[in-house]
Image (tube, helix red, strand yellow):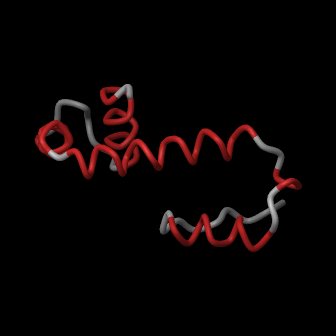
Amino acid sequence: MDCLHTLNKICEELGEDINSPLCKEVEDHLKNCPKCCAHVDSIRKVVRLYQRIENEDVPQAVDNRLWKLLNLCKPEES
């Protein structure tokens, strides 16, 4: 797993610089917590898989559950 890349993405989403205290705290936690590290890795794998498939191949119910599970707002479709 490319933890530095993942950490960088997390910090970007939080609007934080990679060297900020918050990002350092997250980095330290991920180094010492296999459970959270595995969780981040699982999310990363799901996102990568989801990016590779065509939207029309994903049943609407599965799509809705994924957005809910990730606790994200689904973007409005144009």
| In this view, 2 is above or below 20 | above
Q: Position of residue 16 (x, y in %)?
A: 27, 42
For image coordinates 45% across by 47% down, the residue present is 42
The front one of 19 and 46 is: 46
Rendered residue at 60%/39% (across/down): 48
* Quadrant of the drawing holding the C terminus: bottom right
Q: Examine the rendered structure and indicate whether residue 74 appears above or below residue 28.
A: below
Find residue 62 and report its image quarter.
Answer: bottom right
| The quadrant where residue 59 appears | bottom right
Q: Quadrant of the N terminus?
A: top left
At a point 36% along the width and 43% down the height, the residue shown is 10
Q: How many marks?
A: 0
Residue 74 horizontal/vertical position (percent): 64, 66
Q: Position of residue 35 (x, y in %)?
A: 25, 51
Q: Position of residue 66 (x, y in %)?
A: 61, 64
Determine whether 69 is above or below 6 in the image. below
